[in-house]
Amino acid sequence: MHRIEQNNAKFHALQNLTRYILQPTVVKKPLQISFSSRIEIVFQYLTVNLVFQLILGGAITVLLFLVDSRLGTTTTNELATFVQSSSYWELLLIGGILLPLTEEIGFRLPLHFHPVSLGISIVYILILLHSILSSQSSSFFESNNLIMMGIFVSIGSICTLLFFLKRVSVETFWHTHFRWIYYGFAFLFGIMHISNLSSPSLWIYFLSPLIILPQFISGLVMGYIRLQFGFFWGFAFHAIWNTALLSLAYVAYAFLTL
């Protein structure tokens, strides 16, 4: 019976993912299947995500090229700069491990409600917002990093305390509106990546709903994995995904510069 349930879980993995994304609900307990079955399912999701990303990424690249050609502008991607200026081991450490870990903590950890997880997520999102504003050459944000970090940690600590004091009502709200919370964290994950693009044209912001669509879908998939299998599995998916993409980008850049 146990093996039949595991085979069914593997067979229906993509169907379950699609159904959950369309109708997300609170998951109280991770899916009880074997380690090998989890690995097989995660690699199914990696394959499907790759197909979606190739299709959407290619379409968005063409769209940006057409906009740049029409307006005479140049849209640059910070990811390309990162690949060109880093060694392969730096790419693996920063892009393949550190970034996925911090992003999973910030965007997926609080999907299972806990006051501390939510407080940490708030601090992370505030720091991320500060980093994006700092990259826009704002002298205020650049010169007050330590002060701003202290303010963010204080805000997160106060929010955590309030969440503990009002835990029942906050958790009830969380469960009642979980569908939009799940979509909201995936949206934040996607919109965060718009900062990777730099363009003198305001069209980049008008097109942002389309541009962030690949990351939004990835956020939904990783959120599902985090809820069904646990935090480690969501991080592992993210780390493998980033490592694969960065490795391909590194090889492509090395080939072009031969």
Image (spheres, rainbow, N blue to C red):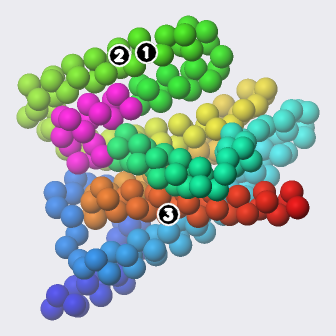
Kindly indicate the quadrant of the structure image that contains residue 169.
top left
> Disc 3 and disc 1: Cα gap in Å?
33 Å
**Secondary structure beneath label 1:** helix
Badge nearest the viewer, 3 or 1: 1
Q: Is residue 26 visible?
A: yes
User: Number of marks in the image?
Assistant: 3
Foreground of the two, 172 or 147? 147
Give SS at disc 2.
Answer: helix
Q: Tell me the amino acid under the disc marked 2.
A: Gly
Give the magenta range.
109-124
**Placement of 171 over or under 88, stated as above or below:** above
C-alpha separation, residue under disc 1 versus residue under disc 2: 6 Å
Residue beneath the point at 46% across and 57% down: 238
Residue at the spot x=24%, y=39% of the render? 117
Q: Are marks 3 and 2 in contact (CB under 8 Å)?
A: no
Residue for badge 2: 150
Kindly indicate whether the residue at mark 2 contacts the one at mark 1 (C-beta within 8 angstroms). Answer: yes
- Where is residue 226? Give x, y as percent: 32, 57
Up-down: is 249 above or below 73? below
Task: Report, in whole angstroms, how far the alpha carbon at label 3 lies from the one at label 2.
Answer: 33 Å
* Residue 104 image point, x, y percent: 39, 48
Q: Does the magenta stretch include residue 178?
A: no
Q: Which amino acid does label 3 sit on?
A: Ile
User: In which quarter of the view is residue 133 placed?
Assistant: top right
Q: Is residue 118 magenta?
A: yes
Q: Crowding near pointer 1: few (<14 within 10 Å), some, many (20+)?
A: few
Q: Residue 240 carries which label?
A: 3
The answer to whether 115 is drawn above or below residue 223 in the figure is above
Residue receiving disc 1: 146
Residue located at (8% from left, 34% from top): 168
